[in-house]
């Protein structure tokens, strides 16, 4: 079953943004990085399981 990227964005978007902002220290770069996280998530949504989404998104934000 595919994950619901839109629901993840609404629920975890602020967390991802805060992580990106904490790393990048620039609001515009943090917004771009957050969008990249969710674009990447959309690309692989059919391959991902709905398990531990906050951990996955936090790690993705850190890596991006």
Image: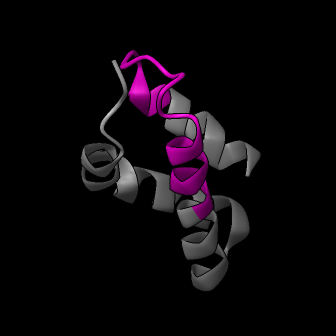
Is residue 9 placed above or below 29 in the rendered structure? above
Residue reaching furthest to the right: 63
Q: Residue at x 25, y 55 (%)?
A: 10
Q: Residue at x 75, y 44 (%)?
A: 63
Q: Nearer the viewer, residue 23 or 44?
A: 44
- Asked whether residue 49 is drawn in magenta, I would say yes
Q: Nearer the viewer, residue 49 or 18?
A: 49
- Asked whether residue 13 is drawn in magenta, I would say no
Left or right: 14 in relation to 44:
left
Is residue 34 placed above or below 54 in the rendered structure? below
- The color scheme shown is one colour
Residue 60: percent from left, percent from top: 63, 41
Quarter holding the N terminus is: top left
Residue 47: percent from left, percent from top: 54, 22
Is residue 17 placed above or below 15 in the rendered structure? below
Q: Residue at x 42, y 32 (%)?
A: 54
Count of residue discs: 0
Q: Residue at x 73, y 52 (%)?
A: 64
**Residue 36, quarter of picture:** bottom right
Left or right: 39 in relation to 3:
right
**Residue 32, quarter of picture:** bottom right
Range of residues picked out in magenta = 36-55
Left or right: 13 in relation to 55:
left
Residue 44: percent from left, percent from top: 57, 35
């Amino acid at each position: 079953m595919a994950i619901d990227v839109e629901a993840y964005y609404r629920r975890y978007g602020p967390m991802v943004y805060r992580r990106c902002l904490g790393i990048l220290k620039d609001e515009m770069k943090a917004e771009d990085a957050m969008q990249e996280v969710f674009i990447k998530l959309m690309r692989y949504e059919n391959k991902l399981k709905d398990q531990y989404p906050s951990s996955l998104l936090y790690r993705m934000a850190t890596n991006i």
